[in-house]
């Protein structure tokens, strides 16, 4: 079960990282079109 | 038609055809071998058609799929690129067998994507190269770093490729009854059609199609079983309950008098074999044979539980001392190895933007998660089926799946105490691969589901082979030939060389695979340490430290690789041992050496030119890279549509 938990946490961490970084791109005006 | 619609329709059609085959089996008695042939022909046919439809001669399309693969689809392609035959077939059984230490593999392989998302993926996309050695060559200047990158890429990828090709041969030979040697070459047809005709473009869309087959075939049997037992079609939710049932069953079995008698006989065999070994005066092959017999006998005498709580405690006991060091070292090496594997890193070159590259890493791990999250449920259902459907049955009336799979050599049923009844200790597991491969029959499902699982295993092996083959061929043709030997080579000549190399590499891998060399499986595990020690420090320092220069990177990569290779060979063959570290975790020494060497050598040598330092700064800002498409070195490459 610990293995399952670590997997789920990694997915959530990367998704949160991508979301927050993409938000920062918009905030600092460096977001791309694609 | 939009991509989601195309692949949605494809999934529906694939399921529809599977149902039709199922109806033909139940209603008209379609023979098993025919079902195997239909599934293999159908899946290879799909991959070949995609290869033909997406063929291209445009270099941007051929090397990086035109940098136009949306995040979700790149995530699916990366998922199937990453999940090899080993993940598909062996993961469930290995998790069940390894207990706590299996966690190192799960955490290492998936945690690597975290490193990839934060340190590498988006920045490599921003840089806009074609291959990983391309990045090393452009970032550090000159050919030396590129050539070291080529050598490391080939060293990591080739053994991995042989293992995949072996997997293809095994699946094809087991399911449709062809010879292994012929099966290997039949399977390669599917790989070559994609990679030769359309390079990364064809490989990408084939991998998406392969992911769909792979995940559907993995989930169907276990979802069905979960629904059958608990009326809930979500095995991830129900298998916890099943583990408790299994544990109660294991305790009951261990207390049974007949089981104790069988175990005692196995223990006697183990003691006798060990005594003969101690007597000496035996040849090496005889000793090896006795050691193997003693190991099997000991395993049968103790599994699954020597005492009432042993099964549980095995899963809960956290290792200490050297055990914990090895656990952490292995997790670390698999993480950096995953983040450094060139065929995975290259996938993030194919997204339209840095933003999509980031999102794509999240999707990649999500799609991998779907399979890994389900793997332990497989193991639990398989164990339950054996406790309930096998233990206690008459030897003369074994279930159909036993008679069907026993010849494959994955397990054996022996009547140790000669009472004509199967005890748990009579079931000798030779390969935990049986958990996934025989699950449909264990569950009493029709053979069409077995065919589906075969198609999934084939998809997993072929998709990884696709990515590896392309990485090796591009390393030779693009990095070595075009960038080092003949920079003036025409586009036609470059692509022709790539295609010829794809065929040659595939044939060499298939030829090597036919020898069935046992060391290959071990070498695959080593690939992670090699990739981690060679690429990871040079890539991370190249992106995050402007001062890292050519001398530092070259010496650092060589030092990291040398230390890792020294410990690998030394610990495996010459009893070298540093802190009791296992061979598979050799990069735990090589990687820090690589980082420190790059840092020290860069500091004592000349700083990189200002132009390179500006380039390093620019890769951190997504918008600055909008114009970075095509050749990062700024050479004018004519783009021709196919």
Image (tube, coloured by chain):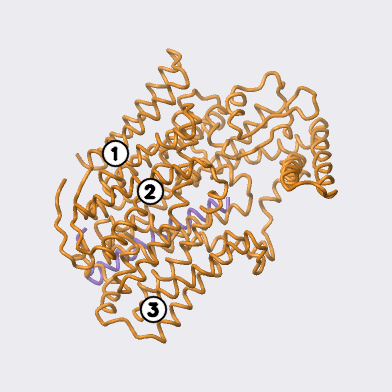
Chain colours: A purple, B orange
Q: Residue at x 40, y 17 (%)?
A: B24
Residue B305 appears in the picture as rendered:
no
| Label drawn at residue B551 | 3
Q: Is residue B114 left or right of residue B125?
A: right
Tell me residue B406's x, y (percent). Answer: 62, 28
* Label 2: few (<14), some (14–19) or many (≥20) C-alpha neighbours in 10 Å: some
Q: Quadrant of residue B576?
A: bottom right
Q: Quadrant of residue B97?
A: top right
Of marks 3 and 1, the one in the foreground: 3
Q: Is residue B57 above or below residue B385?
A: below
* Label 3: few (<14), some (14–19) or many (≥20) C-alpha neighbours in 10 Å: many
Of marks 2 and 3, the one in the foreground: 2
**Closer to us: B181 or B596:** B181
Q: Is residue A29 left or right of residue B333?
A: left
Q: Quadrant of residue B614?
A: bottom left
Residue under label 1: B7
* Chain to which the residue tagged by mark 1 belongs: B
Q: Secondary structure at mark 3?
A: helix
Quadrant of the image containing the N terminus of chain B: top left
Q: Residue at x 43, y 82 (%)?
A: B601
Q: How many numbered callouts? A: 3
Residue B40 appears in the picture as rendered:
yes
Circle 2/circle 3 CB separation < 8 Å: no
Q: Secondary structure at mark 2?
A: helix
Residue under label 2: B505
**Closer to us: B549 or B6:** B549
**Closer to us: B47 or B601:** B601
Using the numbered discs, state the Cα–Cα distance from disc 1 to disc 2 in whole angstroms: 31 Å
* Chain to which the residue tagged by mark 3 belongs: B
Using the numbered discs, state the Cα–Cα distance from disc 2 to disc 3 in whole angstroms: 31 Å
Looking at the image, tell me whether mark 2 or mark 3 is earlier in sequence order: 2
Name of the residue lying farthest toward the top: B28
């Amino acid at each position: 079960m610990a293995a399952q938990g670590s997997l789920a946490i990694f997915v959530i961490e990367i998704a949160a990282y991508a979301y927050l970084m993409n938000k920062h791109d918009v905030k600092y005006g460096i977001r791309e079109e694609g | 038609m939009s991509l989601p619609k195309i692949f949605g329709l494809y999934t529906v059609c694939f399921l529809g055809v599977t149902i039709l085959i199922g109806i033909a089996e139940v209603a008209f008695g379609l023979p098993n071998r025919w079902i195997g042939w239909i599934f293999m022909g159908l899946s290879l046919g799909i991959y070949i058609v995609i290869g033909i439809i997406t063929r291209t001669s445009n270099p941007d399309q051929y090397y990086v799929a035109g940098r136009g693969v949306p995040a979700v689809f790149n995530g699916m392609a990366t998922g199937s690129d990453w999940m090899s035959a080993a993940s598909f077939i062996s993961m469930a059984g290995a998790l069940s067998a390894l207990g706590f230490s299996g966690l190192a593999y799960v955490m290492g392989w998936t945690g690597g994507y975290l490193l990839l998302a934060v340190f590498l993926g988006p920045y490599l996309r921003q840089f806009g190269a074609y291959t990983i050695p391309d990045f090393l060559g452009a970032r550090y200047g000159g050919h030396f770093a590129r050539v070291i990158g080529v050598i490391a890429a080939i060293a990591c990828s080739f053994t991995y490729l042989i293992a995949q090709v072996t997997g293809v041969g095994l699946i094809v030979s087991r399911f449709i009854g062809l010879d292994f040697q012929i099966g290997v070459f039949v399977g390669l047809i599917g790989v070559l059609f994609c990679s030769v005709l359309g390079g990364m473009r064809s490989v990408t869309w084939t991998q998406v199609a392969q992911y769909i087959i792979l995940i559907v075939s993995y989930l169907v049997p276990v979802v069905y079983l979960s629904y059958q037992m608990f009326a809930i079609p979500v095995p991830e939710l129900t298998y916890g309950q099943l583990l408790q049932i299994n544990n109660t069953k294991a305790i009951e079995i261990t207390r049974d008098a007949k089981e104790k008698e069988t175990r005692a006989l196995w223990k006697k065999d183990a003691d006798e074999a060990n005594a003969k070994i101690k007597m000496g005066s035996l040849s090496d092959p005889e000793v090896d044979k006795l050691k193997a017999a003693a190991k099997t006998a000991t395993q049968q005498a103790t599994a699954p539980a020597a005492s009432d709580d042993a099964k549980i405690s095995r899963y809960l006991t956290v290792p200490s001392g050297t055990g914990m060091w090895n656990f952490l070292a292995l997790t670390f090496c698999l993480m950096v190895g995953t983040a450094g594997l060139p065929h995975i890193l290259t996938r993030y070159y194919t997204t339209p933007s840095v933003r999509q590259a980031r999102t794509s890493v999240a999707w990649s791990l999500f799609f991998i998660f779907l399979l890994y999250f389900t793997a332990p449920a497989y193991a639990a259902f398989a164990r339950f089926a054996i406790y309930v459907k096998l233990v206690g049955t008459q030897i003369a009336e074994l279930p159909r799946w036993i008679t069907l799979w026993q010849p494959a050599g994955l397990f054996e049923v022996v009547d140790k105490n000669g009472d004509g009844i199967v005890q748990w200790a009579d079931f000798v597991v030779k390969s935990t691969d049986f958990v996934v491969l025989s699950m449909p029959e264990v569950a009493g499902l029709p053979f069409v589901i077995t065919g589906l699982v075969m198609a999934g295993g084939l998809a997993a092996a072929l998709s990884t082979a696709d990515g590896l083959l392309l990485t090796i061929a591009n390393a030779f043709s693009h990095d070595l030939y075009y960038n080092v030997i003949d920079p003036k080579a025409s586009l036609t000549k470059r692509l022709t060389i790539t295609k010829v190399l794809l065929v040659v590499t595939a044939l060499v891998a298939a030829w090597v695979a036919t020898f069935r060399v046992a060391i290959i499986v071990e070498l695959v595990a080593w690939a992670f340490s090699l990739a981690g020690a060679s690429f990871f420090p040079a890539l991370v320092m190249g992106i995050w430290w402007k001062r890292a220069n050519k001398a530092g990177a070259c010496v650092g990569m060589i030092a990291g690789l040398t230390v890792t290779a020294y410990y690998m060979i030394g610990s495996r063959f010459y009893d070298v041992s540093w802190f009791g570290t296992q061979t598979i975790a050799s990069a735990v020494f090589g990687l820090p050496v690589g980082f420190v060497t790059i840092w020290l050598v860069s500091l004592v040598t000349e700083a990189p030119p200002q132009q390179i330092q500006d380039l390093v700064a620019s890769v951190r800002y997504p918008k600055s890279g909008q114009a970075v498409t095509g050749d990062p070195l700024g050479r004018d490459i004519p783009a021709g549509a196919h």
